[in-house]
Amino acid sequence: MNHPRIAFIGAGNMAASLIGGLLAQGTPASHIRASDPGAEQRAKVAAEFGIELFESNAEAIAGADVVVLATKPQVLKGVCQSLAPNLTTGQLIVSIAAGIGCASLANWLGPRPIVRCMPNTPALLRQGASGLYANTEVSAAQRQLAEQLLSAVGLALWLDEEQQIDAVTAVSGSGPAYFFLLIEAMTAAGEQLGLPRAIAEQLTVQTALGAARMASESDVQAAELRRRVTSPNGTTEAAIKSFQAGGFEALVQKALEAAATRSAELAEQLGQ
Ligand SMILES: NC(=O)C1=CN([C@@H]2O[C@H](COP(=O)(O)OP(=O)(O)OC[C@H]3O[C@@H](n4cnc5c(N)ncnc54)[C@H](OP(=O)(O)O)[C@@H]3O)[C@@H](O)[C@H]2O)C=CC1
Ligand SMILES: O=C(O)[C@@H]1CCC=N1
């Protein structure tokens, strides 16, 4: 297999998840480089993954086919402006930053092939989910390259409209945190009901895993899978009625709208 050379600008949480997933999929460590200003962070990532880390962004991107922008959105403008003179034609930019649009990136980097992507941290286990959007400078081969990169770490779906990235951010980019919150809450509730914490946690996590696998692997819709657990006038019905009395679906809708709105706000505040 022809492995592309990938440089990560910023070696924080999301970059580490992608790097771990790529290595697990078989990308050689010699094909992945990263840069980060923190000496401790560089040492940690180098020790964990056996890849080369750089203090200088310019050094990290030398010879890369793909440059992944993986800093916080708040510092991205400066990062792009200082990176621009060091980029070579043909290098594909993949930005994973929330909010920041292709037009802003092209303003800061110059007209270039840019893929905007919203991944998520389960990429570490090659169970990620990403939405991708390509600007008009991206060639068919580069589109394939971006897809190869993201599908190596999980599901990768192309979007027709850039604006849809806000919704992807709300659903799957931030999504793992919602499930972790539910795991935390169910564990705490199990403990309140008299289980030792470790048992409550193991049961909760295994239940989440089992439910996700059933939803993913069976042909049956989630609503039907739920119905099969819910005996008439039984225990599940009691719990679900309680969730719904508290406005569960409306609350989820509101939470995802807040995430999408924040993504659009980041674009407005930081995209100039
Ligand atoms: N975390 C997630 O689940 C997801 C995150 N994203 C996006 O990924 C991006 C990174 O998020 P996340 O990994 O959580 O953030 P982190 O803060 O964990 O990682 C960003 C890293 O970039 C470093 N950095 C800061 N300035 C520079 C610079 N000038 N050049 C190179 N590196 C720099 C930071 O160092 P220092 O800490 O010293 O400043 C930090 O180590 C964000 O844009 C976010 O929107 C997208 C999808 C999911
Ligand atoms: O919370 C954030 O802003 C980033 C983007 C998606 C997940 N984490």
Image (spheres, rainbow, N blue to C red):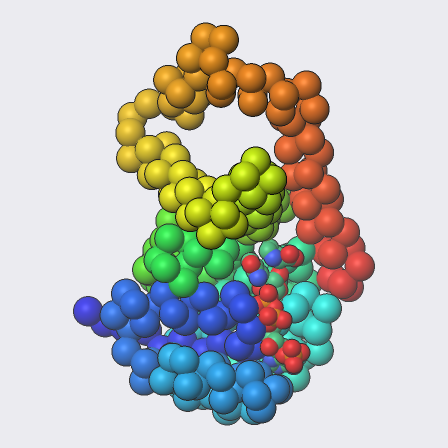
Give the residue displayed 67% in from the left and 44% down from the top.
260
Residue 133 % position (x, y) = 51, 52
Residue nearer the viewer, 192 or 206: 192
Asked if residue 65 lies left or right of residue 255, the reply is left
Residue nearer the viewer, 164 or 222: 222
Q: Quadrant of the N terminus?
A: bottom left
User: Does residue 213 lie above or below 223 as drawn?
Assistant: below
Residue 40: quadrant of the picture:
bottom right
Asked if residue 208 lies left or right of residue 216, the reply is right
Residue 117 % position (x, y) = 51, 56
Asked if residue 26 lies left or right of residue 240, the reply is left
Give the residue displayed 49% in from the left and 8% down from the top.
233
Residue 256 % position (x, y) = 65, 39
User: Does residue 164 lie above or below 245 as drawn?
Assistant: below
Asked if residue 134 lies left or right of residue 251, the reply is left
Residue nearer the viewer, 218 or 207: 207
Q: Residue furthest right?
A: 269
* Residue 269 appears in the figure: yes
Q: Quadrant of the C terminus?
A: bottom right
Ligand 2: quadrant of the figure: bottom right
Residue 46 % position (x, y) = 43, 85
Q: Residue furthest top?
A: 232
Give the residue displayed 29% in from the left and 73% down from the top.
27
* Residue 172 appears in the figure: no
User: Does residue 109 lie above or below 113 as drawn?
Assistant: below
Give the residue displayed 38% in from the left and 70% down from the top.
20
User: Does residue 193 lie above or below 69 as drawn?
Assistant: above
Q: How many marks?
A: 0
